[in-house]
Image (cartoon, rainbow, N blue to C red):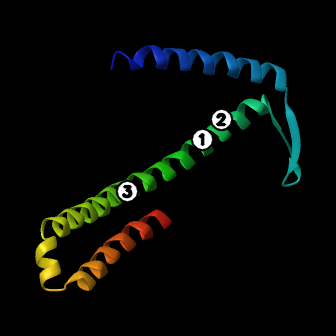
Amino acid sequence: MIPLTPGFVTNLGTFGSMGWILWQHAGPVSFELGGGTVTVPGYLFWVAIGWGLLQTVATHRAGHTLAGATVVQQATEADFRFALAKVRDSAEQVALYRGNAVEQQRLMRLFDAIRANWAR
């Protein structure tokens, strides 16, 4: 918690100073809405707040999706590596019973799961 405090204070100071600059230099903007005139003081400040909120939501959604995909990717890669190790350990039995086609199909199915997750 303590390492986050200086960063929070710095960001709060930046927000305050940049917000003040935007508020002072943007001036008001007026537009007609529903037959009346609406005036928004410091409109660039509100544009910056809206843009920041939009970026936060987009980053949260993308990160949430990516976190789930990473878990699935690690699981499918682990399954593939485990299958490769099992084939290597039982290579003599696979060769003796001529099971290379079956093992090849199984490994390709596992690798296709990796490829499909990468595509997602």
The answer to which of 17 and 76 lies nearer the viewer is 76
Residue appearing at x 69%, y 20% in the figure: 18
Q: Which quarter of the figure is the N terminus placed in?
A: top left
Amino acid under label 2?
Ile
Measuring from the top left, give residue 7's x and y in whole percent.
Answer: 48, 18
Q: Earlier in the sequence, mark 3 or mark 1?
A: 1
Residue appearing at x 80%, y 19% in the figure: 24
The answer to which of 112 and 90 lies nearer the viewer is 90
Residue 99 occupies which quadrant of the picture? bottom left
Measuring from the top left, give residue 12's x and y in whole percent.
Answer: 55, 19
Identify residue for label 2: 49
User: In the drawing, does residue 25 fall left or right of residue 101?
Assistant: right
Q: CA distance from mark 3 to mark 1?
A: 23 Å
The answer to whether residue 65 of the structure is visible from this angle is: yes
Q: Nearer the viewer, mark 3 or mark 2?
A: 3
Residue appearing at x 33%, y 60% in the figure: 72
Q: Residues within 10 Å of mark 1 (few under 14, many from 20)?
A: few
Residue 3 occupies which quadrant of the picture? top left
Q: CA distance from mark 2 to mark 1?
A: 6 Å
Identify residue for label 3: 68
Identify residue for label 1: 53
The answer to which of 85 and 70 lies nearer the viewer is 85
Q: Are marks 2 and 1 in contact (CB under 8 Å)?
A: yes
Q: Secondary structure at mark 2?
A: helix
Amino acid under label 3?
Gly
